[in-house]
Image (cartoon, rainbow, N blue to C red):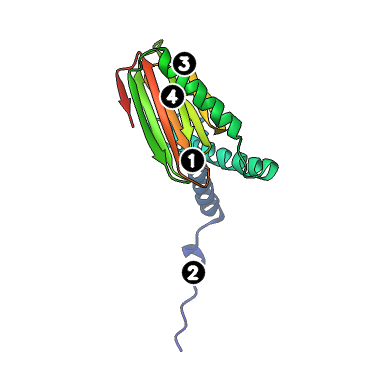
Amino acid sequence: MYNAEKPKKEELPSSKQLLRSTFIALVAAVVILVTIVLPAEYGIDPTRIGRVLGLTEMGEIKQDLAEEAEQDDHSRHGNGEDWSLGAEVLGLFIGSAQAQDAAWSDEFSFTLAPGEGLDLKLVMKKGAVAEYNWVAEGGRINFDLHAHGDGTSKTYEKGRGKASGSGSFTAAFDGEHGWFWRNRDKQDVTIIMQIRGEYSQLKQ
């Protein structure tokens, strides 16, 4: 039977060396937590490094989606699965009236399957104004009207279980401004979208 030789006392690390190694590992863990984990998972970026690396926006999206799912669950438990037919009819009526009011620069529609999401952005300069009108056919929709650019982000409006949306907003800074929709219903939902205003490009 082979027995390993017991290491000599002088070959073992001293208490001072162990303490130093532990301190270095602790500092490294804190740096990774602050610069990578917090921005990427929670959108918290005290050092601004996460914003430069694109991690903060990812964390903010995760938090928005988590909040969205939590609010949806609460809405279902509190109000059941029914949604207001009257709200949808009213939204369709208002949308039709506004569509006849003036010409829109862009008009299109898209369909989201249950659980599916879509991002739509307008490239705008600071101070530019955009008007919009959208109607959801076939169910309810969640949306987040927000913007990001040059390391800055802003939320203009959020909605849960909506059948329509309309209004205008002024770009707070140069960048991409627009919507994120998600279908939290159990059937396909079609969004009819109308936009006009001071934007140079429409991106999906």
Label 2 or label 3, whichever comes before in sequence order: 2
The quadrant holding residue 129 is top left
Measure how far apart labels 1 and 2 are at the Cα level. Answer: 67 Å
User: For the residue carrying disc 1, how many other residues have a C-alpha within 10 Å: few (<14), some (14-19), or many (20+)?
Assistant: many
User: Nearer the observer, disc 2 or disc 3?
Assistant: 3
Residue at 50%, 27% (x, y): give it. Answer: 92
- Residue 49 can be seen in this image: no
Considering every residue shown, the one lying at the far top of the view is 127
The quadrant holding residue 121 is top left
Q: Does dot 4 land on a helix, a strand or a loop? A: strand
Amino acid type, mark 4: Ala
User: For the residue carrying disc 3, how many other residues have a C-alpha within 10 Å: few (<14), some (14-19), or many (20+)?
Assistant: few
Amino acid type, mark 2: Lys
Q: Residue 15, image x and y in percent?
A: 56, 55
Label 3 or label 1, whichever comes before in sequence order: 3
Residue at 39%, 23% (x, y): give it. Answer: 194
Is 115 drawn above or below residue 122 in the view shown? below
> Badges 2 and 3: C-beta atoms under 8 Å apart?
no
Label 2 or label 4, whichever comes before in sequence order: 2
Measure how far apart labels 2 and 3 are at the Cα level. Answer: 77 Å
The residue carrying mark 3 is 168
The quadrant holding residue 122 is top left
Q: Which mark is residue 183?
A: 1
Measure how far apart labels 3 and 1 are at the Cα level. Answer: 23 Å
Is 144 drawn above or below residue 129 in the view shown? below
Q: Which residue is more in the foreground, 119 or 31?
A: 119
Label 1 or label 2, whichever comes before in sequence order: 2
The residue carrying mark 2 is 8
Amino acid type, mark 3: Ser
Q: Quadrant of the C terminus?
A: top left
> Badges 3 and 1: C-beta atoms under 8 Å apart?
no
The residue carrying mark 4 is 147
